[in-house]
Every structure is written in C-alpha cells, then in structure tokens.
Image (spheres, rainbow, N blue to C red):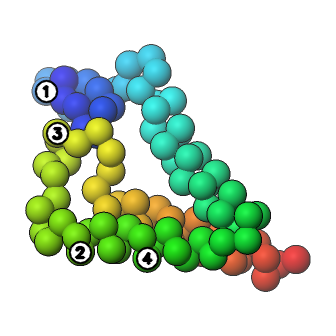
C-alpha cells in the first residue's frame, strides 16, 4: 500500500495491479470537483478566475523552492493545482465560444 496526497493506493507486486479502497476514488472526484466549483463561484461572483492561477503562482514563489514532499502532503502541490485550474478555464472558454 502507498499513500499519495491522502489517497490510499493498493498495489500488488505480483500482478502489478493497482486499486483503490472504498471512498478513495470519491476523494479524487471531490478534489477535482472542488476546483471546478471554486472557479465557477469566482466567475459568478464577478471575480476573474485567472486570479486563482496568479494566487497559486505567488504561493509557489513565496515558498522559494521549498515544496512539501508530495507523499507527506494532504494537498496537491502548487504546480498541479495551477494545471488543474488552467484546464478548467480552457474548458469554460471553449464552452463559451460554442454558445
């Protein structure tokens, strides 16, 4: 068993299979949904959602390369958050253009 960002991942060295216990997949979905919800709420409240990317870039700069170890962290590292938020913003942009 391994744990990454608070998610337990089981691994079988014989068959090289990987699986999640009950509730672990829900944690992954919940985190992804929370980014989407946060960006959507920012947009609906009149804030520029790009500000979230700027915020996480400032947080990253403030750490001056002292990222917590991914295995010991309960939250994604800043780079991962930034990438996830950028994907959400790109999808929202594409949806708006198709209207």
Q: Which residue lies under the disc numbered 4?
A: 54
For the C terminus, which image quadrant?
bottom right
Mark 2 and mark 4 lie on one chain; the one further toward the N terminus is 4
Q: Residue at x 45, y 38 (%)?
A: 28
CA gap, disc 2 to disc 4?
11 Å
Label 2: which secondary element: helix
Q: Position of residue 8 (x, y in %)?
A: 29, 27
Q: Could you tell me if residue 14 is visible in this image?
A: yes
Q: Position of residue 50 (x, y in %)?
A: 55, 76
Q: Is residue 70 left or right of residue 78?
A: left
Mark 2 and mark 3 lie on one chain; the one further toward the N terminus is 2
Q: Is residue 25 left or right of residue 16?
A: right
CA gap, disc 2 to disc 3?
20 Å
Q: Residue at x 32, y 31 (%)?
A: 7
Q: Which residue lies under the disc numbered 3?
A: 72
Mark 3 and mark 4 lie on one chain; the one further toward the N terminus is 4
Q: Position of residue 25 (x, y in %)?
A: 46, 31
As drawn, the residue found furthest toward the top would be: 22
Instruction: Relative to 64, say whether 84 is above or below.
Output: above
Classed neighbour count for the residue bearing mark 2: other residues with Cα under 10 Å, few (<14), some (14–19), many (≥20) = few
Q: Which residue lies under the disc numbered 1?
A: 13
CA gap, disc 3 to disc 4?
25 Å
Q: Which mark is residue 61?
A: 2
Mark 1 and mark 2 lie on one chain; the one further toward the N terminus is 1
């Amino acid at each position: 068993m391994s744990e990454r960002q608070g998610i337990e991942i089981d691994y079988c060295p014989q068959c090289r299979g990987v699986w999640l216990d009950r509730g672990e997949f829900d944690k992954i979905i919940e985190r992804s949904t929370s980014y989407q919800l946060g960006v959507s709420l920012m947009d609906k409240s009149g804030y520029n959602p790009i500000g979230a990317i700027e915020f996480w870039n400032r947080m990253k700069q403030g750490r001056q390369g002292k990222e917590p170890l991914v295995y010991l962290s309960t939250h994604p590292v800043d780079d991962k958050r930034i990438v996830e938020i950028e994907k959400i913003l790109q999808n929202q942009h594409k949806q708006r253009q198709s209207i």
